[in-house]
């Protein structure tokens, strides 16, 4: 077939697919939810086969049949998206593909078809992002609130004091002394636009993963399984659409891995550098990345180290210029906390003594906590089984020592020191999520090499390969599901804040959720100090706070300030030291807004 005829055949095949889908939907079958996908898919396939057969009978020289045979891989990945909730069908598809080892034009066709699936998943992300509610937790609300303030004022500052490790002299102050700010700088100030931006970045990460997976893996069945595990990981069901730092960090890692795979070592270091302005723990991740790239670079190691030194010098210079310290000041003090409440204790001084971090008992406790945190991250549905596959992949990577293998081993090794860095502040449900593409690719690499090691050409060996892939799909991907609209657990509090925005009138507010306050109101905010009435009064005075917001969060607040907050909420107290407090608004859910004024 000449190229023009092949293109026409491909278009005709697409038209038949759309026609069969339209016919299948027009039948309006009443099916139970658990049987809906398999039955509709079988009906779709049957109608398509009938249409294809009927059309081929009337096709001159069999051009359509020949075209269908040549472009068949394009249909396989597109069928995978609705198959995700049906593991036995996904496993069957993988078993069929286990014996398919494309070469030449077939390989290019398969990779492009898998790219079409990646684009389709990106469209799913955009649809979900367009319908997402408010920020799902404090971190996401912080990034959005700071982005709003930057866009509104055009000043490089943040309107929040959410911790007191290094209390700034004023409420409006230099930003990002703990959380790093790249996420806020790339966000739109409107929530709907911000979630679309995060969904778009997530879609780009899927495309980058597709590109990397096609280079790192050989078998189509394993490439398809890896793409679906990454795209619909349970760990990312919220973070892909929330204004969080996880997705930008994953994108930086994937970009660095792609550059390293192409042996563009200095570009890999430069792309990995984006981790520093993205995450508080970015320096540790980047250090391990640079070590892996330098090891892989061989004779080009000097240029790699020069690029890394230039980036690090610029980052340290910025910290010195803004904060007067070589590292972000709050992140530097985080590892020395003895209790989480110390974050919110106003007026205490934390001594950063390195010797306290290296005592054997402290190191042991931190290591146990770190391993427990790593174990709890739900990278894939069957995490325990996949962990064993990843360990096998690590053994194979040690033996191969290719550039990508070195990078993957270094980043997996970095997980433990990152987790140990600050067990008080460490969030197992967030920080390690940026390792998702590495965890999936290392495990998929082990499966890929297991299938590849089987001799070709024997039907019995082919059956073994099919069984391996079917078992992996059935056991590991069994609970996998296409993402749906994510829940919005903080929606009631967000509604309260939006309702109170007119009353607050842009004046400073103290609350147990200051990040949500700056995300949903025009007011700058501070966290309520945890260490008693004197500390609360001192913080309110220092930052000129005029409103005190007490809701259910205040009732759950721990520390010495809890009795005071309860008394203020219940109306049993009308003063905080020399500050007068009077009720202003009480919402139906019991949230109380109090006016704070100096006593006359």
Image: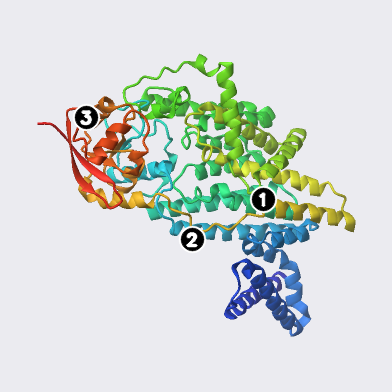
Residue 56 x, y percent position in the rendering:
74, 81
Is there a contact, CB below 8 Å, between mark 3 and mark 2?
A: no
Residue 454 vertical placement versus 307 (above, below): below
Contact, mark 1 vs mark 3 (Cβ under 8 Å): no
Query: Is 547 situated left or right of 289 in this image?
Result: left
Please, which colouring scheme is shown?
A: rainbow
On the question of residue 1 being in view, the answer is: no
The residue shown at (41%, 47%) is 187
Q: Quadrant of residue 115?
A: bottom right
N-terminal of the pair, mark 3 or mark 2, is: 2
Quick one: which residue is furthest to the top in this view? 355
Q: Which residue is mark 1?
A: 226
| 348 lies above or below 85 | above
Image quarter of the C terminus: top left
Number of the label disc, if any, that sits on residue 593 = none
Residue 541, which numbered label?
A: 3
Around disc 3, counting alpha carbons within 10 Å, would you say few (fewer than 14), some (14 to 19), or many (20 or more)? some
Residue linked to disc 2: 127
Q: Is residue 121 above or below residue 314?
A: below
Residue 108 at x, y = what percent?
Answer: 71, 58
């Amino acid at each position: 077939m000449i190229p023009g005829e092949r293109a026409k055949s491909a278009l005709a095949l697409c038209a038949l697919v759309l026609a069969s889908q339209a016919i299948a939907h027009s039948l309006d079958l009443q099916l139970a939810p658990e049987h809906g996908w398999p039955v509709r898919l079988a009906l779709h396939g049957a109608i398509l086969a009938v249409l294809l057969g009927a059309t081929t009978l009337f096709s001159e020289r069999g051009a359509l049949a020949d075209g269908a045979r040549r472009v068949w891989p394009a249909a396989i990945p597109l069928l995978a998206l609705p198959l995700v909730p049906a593991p036995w069908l996904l496993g069957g598809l993988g078993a069929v593909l286990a014996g398919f080892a494309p070469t030449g034009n077939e390989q290019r066709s398969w990779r492009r078809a898998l790219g079409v699936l990646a684009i389709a998943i990106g469209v799913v992300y955009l649809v979900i992002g367009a319908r997402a509610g408010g920020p799902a937790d404090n971190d996401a609300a912080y990034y959005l609130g700071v982005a709003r303030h930057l866009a509104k004022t055009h000043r490089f500052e943040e309107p929040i004091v959410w911790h007191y490790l290094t209390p700034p002299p004023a409420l409006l102050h230099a930003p990002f002394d703990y959380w790093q700010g790249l996420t806020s700088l790339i966000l739109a100030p409107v929530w709907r636009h911000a979630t679309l931006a995060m969904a778009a970045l997530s879609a780009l990460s899927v495309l980058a993963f597709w590109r990397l997976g096609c280079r790192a893996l050989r078998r189509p069945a394993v490439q398809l399984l890896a793409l679906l595990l990454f795209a619909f990981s349970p760990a990312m069901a919220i973070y892909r659409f929330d204004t969080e730092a996880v997705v930008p960090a994953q994108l930086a890692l994937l970009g660095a891995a792609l550059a390293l795979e192409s042996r563009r070592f200095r570009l890999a270091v430069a792309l990995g550098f984006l981790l520093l302005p993205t995450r508080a723990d970015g320096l540790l991740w980047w250090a391990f990345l640079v070590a892996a790239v330098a090891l892989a670079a061989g004779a080009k190691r000097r240029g790699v180290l020069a690029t890394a030194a230039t980036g690090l010098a610029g980052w340290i210079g910025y910290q010195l210029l803004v904060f007067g310290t070589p590292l972000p000041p709050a992140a530097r003090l985080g590892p020395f906390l003895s209790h989480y409440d110390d974050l919110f204790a106003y007026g205490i001084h934390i001594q950063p003594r390195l010797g306290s971090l290296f005592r054997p008992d402290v190191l042991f406790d931190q290591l146990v906590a770190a391993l427990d945190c790593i174990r709890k991250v739900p990278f894939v549905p069957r995490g325990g089984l996949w962990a064993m596959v990843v360990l096998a992949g690590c053994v194979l990577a040690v033996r191969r020592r290719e550039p990508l293998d070195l990078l993957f081993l270094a980043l997996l090794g970095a997980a433990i020191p990152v987790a140990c860095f600050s067990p008080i502040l460490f969030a197992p449900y967030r920080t390690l999520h940026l390792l998702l593409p590495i965890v999936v690719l290392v495990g998929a690499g082990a499966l890929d090499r297991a299938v590849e090691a089987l001799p070709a050409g024997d039907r019995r060996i082919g059956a073994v390969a099919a069984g391996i892939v079917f078992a992996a799909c059935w056991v590991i991907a069994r609970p996998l599901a296409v993402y749906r609209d994510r829940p919005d657990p903080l929606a009631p509090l967000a509604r309260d804040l939006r309702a109170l925005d007119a009353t607050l009138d842009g004046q400073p507010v103290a609350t147990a959720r200051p990040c949500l306050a700056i995300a949903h109101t025009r007011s700058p905010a501070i966290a309520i100090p945890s260490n008693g009435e004197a500390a609360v009064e001192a913080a309110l005075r220092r930052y000129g706070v005029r409103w005190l917001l007490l809701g259910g969060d205040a009732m759950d607040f721990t520390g010495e300030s809890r009795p005071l907050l309860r008394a203020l909420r219940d109306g049993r107290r009308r003063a905080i030291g020399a500050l007068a407090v009077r009720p202003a608004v009480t919402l139906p859910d019991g949230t109380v807004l109090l006016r704070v004024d100096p006593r006359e």
